[in-house]
Image (spheres, rainbow, N blue to C red):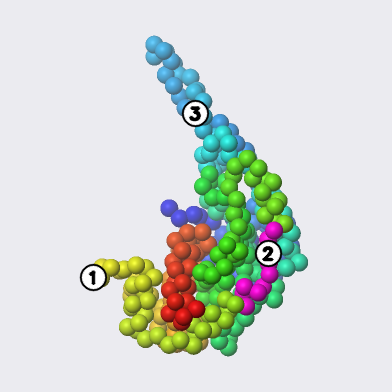
């Protein structure tokens, strides 16, 4: 089941595709944004037990399991099951990250997923906005995230957003500097402090990436080549039925912003990222699923693959 949005704040009149949360006309300071999204709750680690039948069958005892639950203290919701060694990282650590970079970014949104099992914020880097072709704007964002589900770590990553369709453009280049993450082991909070102090919001990579995207827009691609491009990105075997193909073809020809650079590699990349990551014009359920896929899941991986294949096509 895809992650569901439990509470949220969205700035800049962003459409509330999930149907939940508060939308404001502009941005907010980080703390106010987190408070508005109800994202400053705390969590506790509590040992889990199970009923064990007493000898002779006379009643039951609660037997410690050796596993621990991560519990949201205000709602008592169980967010995940973890080991004894798991170290909690509280949400105010993620807030500290957002506050640390406040001079470099404008907050876009704070979202609480699955009743608090995962929280994240997105913010746009000031000065990191460019047109790939006139009117087709791409912006660089930082995504800070923290999981209490026992599976997701905490950290930050950079992504690019195509404004016209809200596609998440996960770059294939500069991966080591584009993402930093840590796990919930002993010393996690210390590592988080180190992560905050090491975040690089430099814009030089964005300039390079935009030039690559402009090269995509200058390279033509017809329908037959797009068919092969899809096969390569999705690793489709010859003769295999691929149910997404018609949607992808429609997005390539008529998708959001397809008139900016028609029949180009840029349109090919955007067709795939629109289907896999865009939240524009979606239902609440679809928008939530797309946000999770495009930020943390399969959508991000497919987007990254599309950029890699496109870069090879243009000889980058």
Of the image marks 2 and 3, the number of the one nearer the N terminus: 3
Q: Which residues are magenta?
A: 198-207
Q: What residue is disc 3 on?
A: 65
Q: Is residue 202 magenta?
A: yes
Query: Around disc 3, counting alpha carbons within 10 Å, would you say few (fewer than 14), some (14 to 19), or many (20 or more)?
Result: few
Q: Which residue is mark 2?
A: 200
Q: CA distance from mark 1 to mark 2?
A: 46 Å
Q: Report the side of 3 relative to 21 (left or right).
A: left
Please check the rendered image and state whether residue 78 is part of the magenta-colored stretch, yes or no: no
The residue located at (49%, 88%) in the rendering is 218
Q: How many residues crowd around disc 1 within 10 Å: few (fewer than 14), some, or many (20 or more)?
A: few
Depth check: give the residue in front, 69 or 231: 231
Image: 10 above or below 203: above
Alpha carbon separation for disc pair 3 and 1: 50 Å
The picture quadrant where one finds residue 113 is bottom right
Whole-Å distance between the Cαs marked 2 and 3?
A: 42 Å
Is residue 23 visible in the rendered image? The answer is no
- Residue 168 image position (x, y, % from top left): 53, 69
Question: Which of 47/56 is in front?
Answer: 47
- Given residues 276 and 301, the one toward you in this image is 301
């Amino acid at each position: 089941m895809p992650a569901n949005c439990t509470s949220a704040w969205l700035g800049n009149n962003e459409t509330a595709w999930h149907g939940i949360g508060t939308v404001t006309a502009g941005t907010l300071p980080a703390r106010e944004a987190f408070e508005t999204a109800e994202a400053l709750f705390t969590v506790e680690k509590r040992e889990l037990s199970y009923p064990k039948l007493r000898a002779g069958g006379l009643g039951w005892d609660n037997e410690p399991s050796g596993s621990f639950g991560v519990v949201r203290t205000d709602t008592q919701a169980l967010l995940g099951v973890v080991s004894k060694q798991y170290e909690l990282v509280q949400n105010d650590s993620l807030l500290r990250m957002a506050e640390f970079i406040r001079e470099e970014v404008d907050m876009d949104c704070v979202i609480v997923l699955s009743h608090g099992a995962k929280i994240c914020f997105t913010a746009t880097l000031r000065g990191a906005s460019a047109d790939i072709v006139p009117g087709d704007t791409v912006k660089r964002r930082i995504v800070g995230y923290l999981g209490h589900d026992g599976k997701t770590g905490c950290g930050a990553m950079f992504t690019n957003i195509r404004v016209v369709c809200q596609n998440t453009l996960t770059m294939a280049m500069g991966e080591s500097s584009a993402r930093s993450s840590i796990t919930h082991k002993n010393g996690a909070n210390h590592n988080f402090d180190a992560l905050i102090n090491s975040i690089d919001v430099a814009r030089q990579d964005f300039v390079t990436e935009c030039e690559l995207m402009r090269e995509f827009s200058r390279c033509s691609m017809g329908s037959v080549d797009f068919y092969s491009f899809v096969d390569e990105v999705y690793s489709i075997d010859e003769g295999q039925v691929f149910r997404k193909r018609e949607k992808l073809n429609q997005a390539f020809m008529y998708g959001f912003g397809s008139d900016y650079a028609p029949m180009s590699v840029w349109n090919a990349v955007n067709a795939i990222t629109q289907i896999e990551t865009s939240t524009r014009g979606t239902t609440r359920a679809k928008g939530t699923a797309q946000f999770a896929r495009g930020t943390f899941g399969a959508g991000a991986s497919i987007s990254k693959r599309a950029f890699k294949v496109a870069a090879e096509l243009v000889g980058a």
